Amino acid sequence: MFGRRKDRGGAVTHASGQDLELANSHEPKEAGNHHQKHHHPVYNHNGHKVTRGIHPDGESGRKGVHPHHFLRISARSTSKLSMVVNVLWPFVPAAIAVRYAHPEAHVWIFALNYIAMVPSANLIGFAGQELARKLPKVFGVLLETFLGGLVEIVLFMVLLRKNVDDPADVNHYNKLIPVIRAAILGSILANLLLCMGFCFFAGGLRRDEQDFDGAISEVGSGLLMTAGFGLMIPAAFFTSLSGSTEVELSPQDLINKVLTVSRVTAVILFVAFLLYVWFQMRTHHSIYDAVLEKDEARDHDRHKDLKKDKLTFTECILALVIAITCVCLHAVFLVEEIEYIVEEKGVSDAFMGLILVPLVEKAAEHLTAVDEAWDNQINFALAHVLGATVQTALFNGPLVVIVGWGLHKAMDLNFEIFNAVVLILAIIVAGNFLRDGKSNYLEGALCILIYIIIAVTSFYYPNPRPGSAGTSEASPTTGEGGAAVEGGEKLRFLR
């Protein structure tokens, strides 16, 4: 149980169990027995009675849905940056209206839905944070990270569902698979270089250095190396055998073997993710609890955050339903126009997947992490950055391969060599910056500059021809009776 006391700022907080034990040591024994039999109400820092099962920090003091409070608190969002993003909400109805009123306006539909995705994803991040406050620390961070990656999962699934897997349709056959593969790696790069870079840079502007705990960085770095190894194996397998003169293997057989290797790898990476979650939540959760609680204690704005009004549990669920609905609509409309933007406007698969898609799906999550680093909560920021990266590499990426397997779609992990090299180098760079347990604005600026170099390079990177590494799908040609023929002469392996 918690008692009530005043902190230095005058806010009502809770005394620890140890404090109460010392305070009650002078009471008669009978009184102690009386307190053990009758549970007194618990009040949080704002004087709200704490609902059973709700963490005091997340108690709103209300129940149900109150429209005025719901809109006011949601508009406030998690930080000033997130609050500014809410001015983009008018783009949400505009994007939907233009999609149905002018379906031929492809560029406008793409641009409006791209922008509208940002406030919708921001609401998911805010509702996830409000929900996480009501739960135990480690579980709350994991849930918040998962909800932040929900936009990514939706986009991947919509891209996979919209992909044409009929070889007879030569013009659209497997056009979106390279975009999905690039988006998987692009999401990892956006987290590791762009988001972590801004976290280091923002935190370094207010202090010389920030120290973070090895429990956060070491586990994250190890998992990233494992994920990088697993994701690159199918591409290495394809590259080494496609140019070999010692192995008699037809192009289609090689494609089938790469697909099998990718699916097995996806299942193994999925198991690694489950082990990671079990490690954090069950066997070593006390370590992470201690690290995160220490981070909360040095939060510059903690007294302000505690005094802010909170959403009720019901309002959190309502906000998530609204935001996820909007995200799904915008994802569908956005994906419908990707092929037009790539083919008619000359935007490469690499730039679309590595840069454009990850930026919009990760925008809200990045704002939250940067705000935490600015407030000296660098462990929380890294937990979100590395947690989101691990989720993409070990869960979201393998999930789309497994779902594609169930839908009989040729979704594999045969990444383009350019993408593979960039990923490995990014993991090495991030690992070196995390090794010493300290960060500053210079390291952050260097990460951002590396990301800009990758963005410029991917913009000018041409789409690979069918049959090269990263496009293991063959170029189909129609034979007699309309059947697709995929022969060795039609499949060109380019180096």
Image (tube, rainbow, N blue to C red):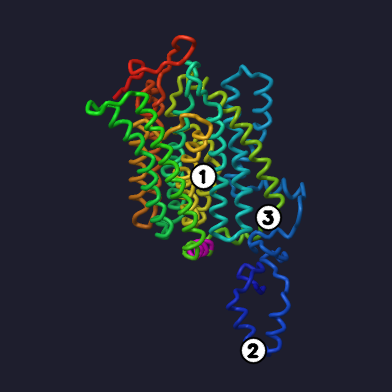
Residue pointed to by mark 2: 26
Residue 266 sits above or below residue 290 on the image: above
Q: Nearer the viewer, residue 54 or 88?
A: 54
Residue pointed to by mark 3: 310
Q: Quadrant of residue 115?
A: top right
* Contact between labelled residues 3 and 2, with CB atoms less than 8 Å apart: no
Residue 189 sits above or below residue 13 on the image: above
Q: What is the distance, in whole Å, between disc 1 and disc 2 at their CAs? A: 51 Å
Q: Magenta segment: does it hold 424?
A: no
Left or right, 92 with reference to 385: right
How many circles with numbers are drawn on the protein? 3
Residue pointed to by mark 1: 366
> How would you rate the neighbour count of disc 2 (Cα within 10 Å): few for under 14, some for 14-19, many for 20 or more?
few
Q: Which residues are magenta?
A: 289-296
Magenta region's main secondary structure? helix
Q: Nearer the viewer, residue 184 or 161?
A: 161
Q: Amino acid at mark 1?
A: His
Where residue 307 sits in the image (x, y, percent)? 66, 60
Q: Secondary structure at mark 2?
A: helix
Residue 199 showing in the rendered view: no
Residue 349 sits above or below residue 71 on the image: above
